[in-house]
Amino acid sequence: GSGATLPLATLVRHSANHSTYHRGQLASMLRRLGAAPPSTDLLVFAVEQSQRDG
């Protein structure tokens, strides 16, 4: 394909949005398998990391 120039902020937003999609897909798969998926909330992750790292 042809190249394009995009602002860095657009690429960062796309990356965050795309990863959210995949986390949702994995959570859905786990639920269908009868498993409880972990939280996909960034703030929950950050707090857990902070508590673990002391």
Image: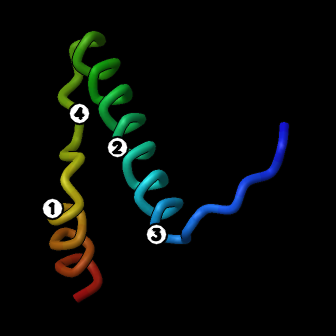
Q: Nearer the viewer, mark 1 or mark 2?
A: 2
Q: CA distance from mark 3 to mark 4?
A: 30 Å
Q: Nearer the viewer, mark 4 or mark 2?
A: 2
Q: Is residue 29 above or below residue 1?
A: above
Between 54 and 7, the one nearer to me in the picture: 7
Colour convention of the picture: rainbow
Mark before the other along the chain sequence, 3 or 2: 3
- Say what amino acid the circle numbered 1 marks: Val
Q: Horizontally, is 31 left or right of 29 in the view? A: left
Q: Residue at x 48, y 54 (%)?
A: 15
- Say what amino acid the circle numbered 4 marks: Pro
How crowded pointer 3 is (Cα within 10 Å; few <14, some 14-19, many 20+) is rated as few
Badge 2 element: helix
Q: Quadrant of the C terminus?
A: bottom left
Q: Horizontally, is 23 left or right of 45 in the view? A: right
Q: Give how far across and how far down residue 23 sits, in percent.
A: 35, 38
Residue underneath mark 1: 44
Q: CA distance from mark 1 to mark 2?
A: 14 Å
Residue underneath mark 2: 20
The disc at residue 37 is 4
Mark before the other along the chain sequence, 3 or 4: 3
Q: Quadrant of the N terminus?
A: top right
